[in-house]
Image (cartoon, rainbow, N blue to C red):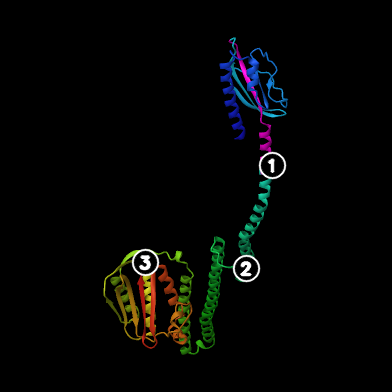
Amino acid sequence: MILDSELERAKEEIERTAASFNESLESVPQDNLLNAYAPVDGMIRIVKENLDLKAPITASSSYKHKIKKEYFTNEVIKIIRNNDTYTFGSIPIILPDGEVANLQIAKSIEKTAENLMILRLVLIAVTLVAMVPVIISSRLLGNLIISPITSMIKTMAEIRQSGKFKRLSLKGKSGDELHEMGETFNHMIDLLEANFEKQKQFASNASHELKTPLTVIESYASLLKRRGKREPEIFAESIEAIHSEAIRMKDMTEQLLLLARHNEQWNIEWSNVDVTEFTQASARAFQNAYNRNIVVKSDSNPVIKTDEQKLKQLLFIFLDNARKYSEDDITVLIGEKDNVPFIRMTDSGIGISRDDLPKVFDRFYRVDKARSRKTGGVGLGLSLAKEIADAIDVDVELESIEGVGTTATLFFR
């Protein structure tokens, strides 16, 4: 920009000088005009087409550069770098005799070039000096950013090597993305550890539950081998026990397989269902199968979108629990609460204590183990019901008073 400015100034200067020359050449001698317009640190000359040239006129003895004689047909403005740096301008003029010549002016801009060089050196020096804090701050910032990631990698490696769940140590609450990433990582570890513990407990409980019927079957099979042929009563008792335990193992295995599924594997088939009609049909089927009286009442006739088979399975689980733990009629009420349809099933059975109520949806949890063993329960029914309810968007509420009865309500979201 500075050099362009110098060129622009040189152009304006030579154009003004040429205009004055054209006006004054006839009345003022040429040498006098050249001396009058000679630049302080440069030269002025007139070059004819035949390169006839007198010595250039200079206003300073310090001007030492020689410029090659050259005639131009057009106006020329440029910067020439030799031992010195200067602007050079050439513009055609008409001499008094009618001949066309070039008025050429050269002016040193060495000071400007030196200032530019100093400016370059200053900018380079400032850049180098500025790079020091930039590099230091970049290193510190890099360490600040990389530190949580390094800690996370180290924690992952320790988890892989030790097999134990570990968490990141988060300092403060910065709220930035890295802190959020650390919190997410810790939350993920919490979920993994919880699921791992549940899986371990599930495997332990499953093996324990399967061990019992297998032991019973083995014992009765051994009894059959020893005395079954001679004693018909023992034969009948053993066959009945083995058959009962085999059925219980089959049911338990089916429920375990269902519980092992994820929500994506439920293969839900949505359809519109008339709740009253559907519940009445399901209750009749259950009543015919188990010869138990079920009273169905309806305060409204809602239509919902759900999976019929999964909903029927869900109803049968709660009806089956009511059948096992109650000898009286089972009441089913269909209604709406705050425009939310529900099915409420009530029995007058043994009920569930307040301490046990929050745990009944856990796998293999049984409120009365002796009673459950007698009725064939393994503590998977309500856990399976919770899984099915989540899969078809149903909220389950369980209310119970020990010795009075239990009420299970299905709310359709």
- Badge 3 marks a residue whose secondary structure is loop
Q: What amino acid is labelled 3 in the image?
A: Asp
Quarter location, residue 181: bottom right
Q: Which residue is mark 2?
A: 159
- Badge 2 marks a residue whose secondary structure is helix
Q: Can residue 110 be found in the magenta stretch?
A: yes
Query: Which residue range is magenta in the image?
Result: 98-122
- Badge 1 marks a residue whose secondary structure is helix
Q: Nearer the viewer, residue 2 or 22?
A: 22
Q: Quadrant of the N terminus?
A: top right
Q: What amino acid is labelled 1 in the image?
A: Leu
User: 379 left or right of 79?
Assistant: left
Q: Which mark is residue 53?
A: none
Q: Which residue is mark 3?
A: 307
Alpha-carbon span between mark 2 and mark 1: 55 Å
Q: Of the two numbered discs 1 and 3 on the same chain, state the one appearing first in sequence.
A: 1
Q: What amino acid is labelled 2 in the image?
A: Ile
Residue 321 in percent (x, y) is at 39, 80
Q: Which mark is residue 121?
A: 1
User: 132 left or right of 241?
Assistant: right
Q: Of the two numbered discs 2 and 1 on the same chain, state the one appearing first in sequence.
A: 1
